[in-house]
Amino acid sequence: LLAEPAEEVLGQDPWMERTLMVVGDVDQSIYSWRKADYKIMLSFQSDFKPARLIKLEENYRSTQTILDVANSIISNNSERIDKVLRCNRDKGGKVQCFEAQDEIDEAYYIVEELKRLTARGRTLKDCVLLYRTNAQSRALEEVLVRNHIQYTIVGGTRFYERQEIKDVLGYLKLIYNPADGQSFNRVINVPRRGLGKTTLDRVNQYAIESGISPIQACLEAETIRDIAGKTGKSLKEFGEMVNRWHMLSKSIPVSQLLDTLLKETKYIDKLQEDANSSKDELALGRIENVRELIAVAQEFEKSADEPDLDSFLTRISLVSDLDAVREGEDSVTLMTLHAAKGLEFPVVFLSGLEEGLFPHMRSLDSETAMEEERRLMYVGVTRAEDSLYLTLARKRMILGRGPAGGSGFTSNYTVPSRFLREITPGLLAGYYPPPAGERRQEIEQDDPFVQGGGWGQAPSRGGGGYQNNYGGGNSRPNNYGGGNSRPTNYGSSGNSRPTNYGSSGNSRPNNYGGGGSYGSSNSYGGGANRSGSSQPPAKPRAMRMDPNAAPPARTQHSQEVSAPVSFERLAVGDKVQHAKFGIGTVVQVIGEQDKELYN
């Protein structure tokens, strides 16, 4: 019914007998790229004038707060049947909003929230991670793997198992090892070079009999029996190309090598051609996946001790080997927003709420497309039964073009999604980006700020690490699959500055789950500045959802002191007592002297 005009499908007979009932929801029409047309439902009453409209506005799934968020967003669409959802259950808590430093920081926040939720009785199966594009799953998958959290992808394939990713990695493996016959056979015809199975069988047989690599056999193709002319020339050109890349791999970064091979093979061009011919959202997603792999390489180059091709392939192998779900084990669900339609989960994480990502860049110039993106947001929000998290990244790796026309990934500032601005003030809690003008000033200055203090306790950009985000100033772990999480803890002992066992236990108030968790005295909207500070609050990156609301009043903390707290320096293995979390053991010491932090 949503793909064809109603009168063409139904004719007049059922209507004449007044036995027809049609059920539909314009606000959940999200498949225009599959030819679904929401206007059919809008025009139904005009097509069948005696029809009576009955609105089903009582919702049996979500809390009223979640429904209020959904209502406030979808009400901005002009082409819809007006309705306001209401629930028959409790109001529920506020929707949590968090602005991360980048996509990896966003993934860590989600993973640490999963840990906190499961510690409080939730199962991983209660939770779903939703995203606009398949490429977004990569960062989530890698952080889940590092933390040994099982996951299941619904309606899609794990990032490193996707055909296009296997193709590109196949090229890299062949470049690293020209004798890799399996990789050779995978990529020799990707994109198609007009080489048939018989020809490839002859090349492989020649390589085996001559004791040479498949690439060397390609270089000698014109001497192989029954291979000549155009076919022999094509094989030789392929062999020369791989040999050239093999030499290049020793002197250029992996990301640059990827960019080179993608251009010379015209792999992206072929994917774009396929996408243009089918106009399929999934076909466009394959391009985004390949671009995401370049972002993986750039992240690797920043963190690895030896950022060469061998180390990159080893790291990718570790991730892909570790991410298999063990049968019967509790696992969190990952899926795109489109795949989530019709499903429901107690806890929903909706990530990537940035302009150009969600709403998608293809919708920015079309009001009709933008309204469909808004309907997709509505679908995502209403999947949640009890708890909803909305996340975005302050910076995200995106593909850009330099002055010389070359393409490459850079970490660029993002613009928060318009959907966040459309949510009624007072429904959200957590860390939210500042207004556009203030954010623009921050981006232009690009200065480190919020070094502690100030209501909201927003994460700092200074220091190149995770300062104030998860309790300390530590960098990300450098090994895929090595290290369960960031060196700092979230929601446990939290990198606090504990005193010795038996003392008062003043913790750093800006730790998540310590003195600065959501709803505590030092949290966003909690109502207190950092204890012991006599200075005005530093300019926060986090802003109240209500722009007219005043910052919370500063109050005196019961443990406020006029001089710095002194305490005996601790070592790994020492027993300590935390003011909130009780007795624990020091497992890591970070920093030196009076700036030491303890896990």
Image (tube, rainbow, N blue to C red):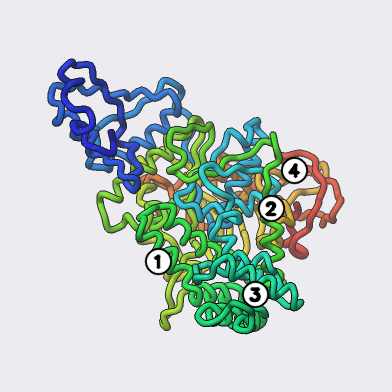
Q: Give the Cα separation between the discs numbered 4 and 2.
A: 27 Å
Q: CA distance from mark 1 to mark 3?
A: 45 Å
Question: What amino acid type is highlighted by mark number 3?
Answer: Ile
Task: Report the disc number at residue 570.
Answer: none
Between the C-alphas of marks 1 and 2, the distance is 36 Å
Per the image, label 1 sits on a secondary structure element best described as: helix
In the image, residue 229 lies at what x, y percent?
52, 82
The numbered disc on residue 175 is 3
Task: Say which element carries label 2.
Answer: helix
- Mark 2 or 3: the one toward you: 3
User: Could you tell which of marks 2 and 3 lies nearer the N-terminus?
Assistant: 2
Residue position marked by numbered label 2 in the rendering: 146
Amino acid at dot 1:
Gln
**Dots 2, 3 in contact, CB < 8 A:** no
> Which of labels 1 and 3 is toward the front?
3
Circle 4 sits on which residue?
A: 578
Sequence order check, earlier mark of 4 and 2: 2
Mark 1 highlights which residue? Answer: 441
Q: Residues within 10 Å of mark 2 (few under 14, many from 20)?
A: many
Judge from the rendering whether residue 345 lies leftward or rightward of residue 142; answer left or right: left
